Image (cartoon, rainbow, N blue to C red):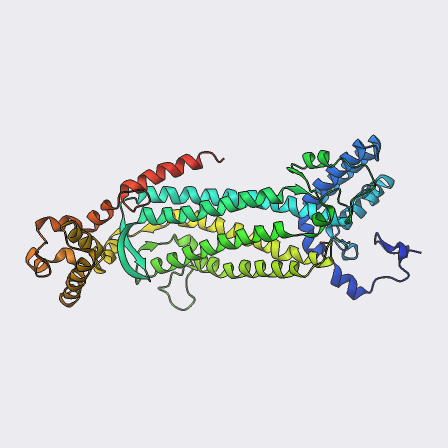
Amino acid sequence: MGDTTSSQLWTGRFSEATDKFVEKFTASEHFDRRLYRHDIQGSMAHARMLHKIGVLSSAELEAILGGLEAILADIERGDFAWLPELEDVHMNIEKRLTDRIGEAGKKLHTARSRNDQVATDVRLYVRDAIDAITAELIRFQRGLVDLAEQHADVIMPGFTHMQVAQPVTFGHHMLAWYEMLVRDQERLADCRKRVNVMPLGSAALAGTSFPVDREFTARELGFDRPSRNSLDAVSDRDFAIEFVAACAMIMMHLSRMAEELILWASPILGFIELPDRYCTGSSIMPQKKNPDVAELVRGKTARVQGHLTALLTLMKGQPLAYNRDNQEDKEPLFDTIDTVRDSLHAFADMVPNLQVNAARMYQAARQGFATATDLADYLVRKGVPFRDAHEIVGKAVRYGVEQSKDLSEMSLEELRQFSPAITEDVFAVLTLEGSVAARDHLGGTAPAQVRAQVTAARERLAQFP
Ligand code: ARG
């Protein structure tokens, strides 16, 4: 039969037109049109393969490649009428191709299904996203390493339980963030290996009766290899879920950084000043300078975590092979990509440009008895067992709280009330400078270690463009 007024590509077996509501309900072109470049890229490689195995003549191949090229240009110029009745990006482009070049266009879909086509498009898209996100991760890492070097000697309070614990260097803190981002980058690189596998040739689910050269198509598209099982290749979206999981981890890290930036920028701590161009004011309180970008990154983390849950849940009940459920993978996936890329972009610009208020950090570290552990360690070196040393220093701190005096502000006589093992040389360990400098081993907070890690990080970063 086939309603001749319909533009749909599969009307042959139907006796009535699709319900208008169903047409709208099932359409995805309004969001999957984002795949147009990758769809065209995949179609071009598929057409070359069809020509290679003798399914398309040279003239047909030229017509198809020229037509797809022109469609690509139309879309990029904004001169392409997307039709919801054509459902998705794949059929919109295929139909336009046939309208443009005639008969040859109808041959493009030989030995292919939208099922292997969409799985291929999404893999190509995620591969590009991984590369773009990785570039932002590297840019941010470089900014953090520069910041760490500039502030290798700046002393701040290190916190546990959000209580002043021990002095650390600001450079050391920046390098802690850098390490998180290195792991994030490694996760993406590992995920990319499983993304970079080509479904084309799997067709609808069982493969195709044409003698396809899948190695050829895979090479054309820069895939490491063709998939080994057609049922699996058209159905599973684990590669996308894994990617979103890696992104959720990135956002979790950015959110932790955001939380610290917000606290540090609060006038109550006043450790840092964020660049004005990354903050906004209040419509009622003239004094306000709000760290909105950091807050939004913290907030947007929730959406990516939600997308991860959505995709896991989307996949969990699906039998082999392709099911239309999978059309629902795109919006969470696309929004994840936008959110992570933009959040990293913002942080890579903002964080390396923050102003450090070293005096405020120093003052805060002095107020919290941050060198108490150093005094205990000192007593241990003088022969006092650590548990006794802990008790002695606890008493000294209690005295300091009562007298509003830091340990380093007490006289030798005051300190000796707590232990006769304390002598003149104690003051070297009670200073914040002495405390950080003493932690001079791999992984420690000493300025010398920060500088060594900066050098190592720069060597690692030199391998990337
Ligand atoms: N728009 C669909 C998707 O995103 C493309 C594949 C549709 N395949 C099908 N047999 N209906 O998954």
What percent of the width, then of the height, locates residue 108? Answer: 81, 41
Q: Residue furthest right?
A: 1
Count up the numbered dots: 0
Left or right, residue 329 beside residue 459? right
205 shown above or below 24 = above
What percent of the width, then of the height, locates residue 199? Answer: 71, 44
Q: Where the N terminus falls, by quadrant? A: bottom right
- Residue 77 appears in the rendering: no
Give the image quarter of residue 8.
bottom right
373 shown above or below 42 = below
Choose between 412 and 464: the one closer to the eye. Answer: 412
Left or right, residue 97 beside residue 426? right
Give the image quarter of residue 326.
bottom right
- Residue 150 appears in the rendering: yes
What percent of the width, then of the height, locates residue 170? Answer: 31, 49
Q: Residue furthest left?
A: 413
Ligand 1: give its quadrant.
bottom right
Left or right, residue 7 beside residue 79? right
What percent of the width, then of the height, locates residue 320? Answer: 73, 55
448 shown above or below 297 = above
Residue at point 35%, 64% (across, down): 287
Residue at point 48%, 45% (across, down): 137
